[in-house]
Structure formats: structure tokens, C-alpha cells
Amino acid sequence: MKFDHSYKPYSIYNHNEHSKIIILCDHASKTIPKKYKNLGLSTKNVNKHIGWDIGALKLAKKISQKTKSTFIYSGYSRLLIDCNRALQTKGA
């Protein structure tokens, strides 16, 4: 399988190596690579809460700025992979 480098599996925002806090957001994105054809779902449904945690990315970025903390967030929809579960977990 060829990896599509146009999609980032995660991003780091406000990197601060001196911070004692790391903020994570595993449902920050609704992105599903085109080759997966929205997993057969309509764009309307992917844009709903089933696809991502609406507002989580914006809120976590604000918290990261206020606390001067590193923030790491997922680049894929939880419909594609649920990043808060081990890959071996059923449903991940």
C-alpha cells in the first residue's frame, strides 16, 4: 500500500520543550483521505459529531496558548481510526 503524504496523521502546535504539560486531542479532525471515499458516508454525516469532536481543536489550541503547553492532535477522523485506542482493540 502506498502512503499518501498529503495527509498528516498528527500535528504539533505551540511546541514548548520547557512545559510540564502536554495537551492531546485525539478527535480533533474530521479528515478522511479521499481514497476511503468518506467510508461510504455523506459529507454531512462526517461533519457531525460521529466524525470528530466539534470545537475540540479550537478549544485545545486556546488552552495550549494560555498554558504555554505543547499540543498534539490527530489529523484523521475517528471514523477512520480511533486514536485513543490501541490498534489491536476491536473498533479502533
Image (spheres, rainbow, N blue to C red):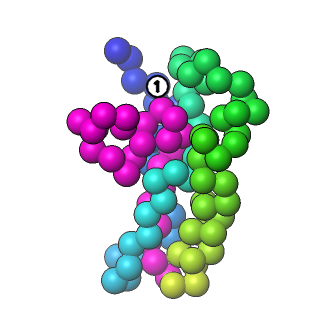
Left or right: where does residue 11 sit relative to residue 83? Answer: right
User: Which residue corresponds to the image point at 37% horizontal and 51% vertical from the top-left?
Assistant: 84
Whether residue 35 can be seen here: yes
* Residue 90 drawn in magenta: yes
> The C terminus is located in which quarter?
top left
Amino acid type for the residue under numbered disc 1 = Asp
Magenta extent:
68-92
The picture places residue 20, in percent across and down from the top left corner, at 34, 83
User: Which residue corresponds to the image point at 65% horizontal and 64% vertical from the top-left?
Assistant: 58
Q: Mark 1 — residue?
A: 4
The picture places residue 76, in percent across and down from the top left corner, at 51, 40
User: Which residue corresponds to the image point at 65% horizontal and 47% vertical from the top-left?
Assistant: 49
Whether residue 34 can be seen here: no
The quarter of the displayed image where residue 41 is located? top right
83 w.r.t. 13: above or below: above
45 w.r.t. 24: above or below: above
Left or right: where does residue 50 sit relative to residue 10? Answer: right
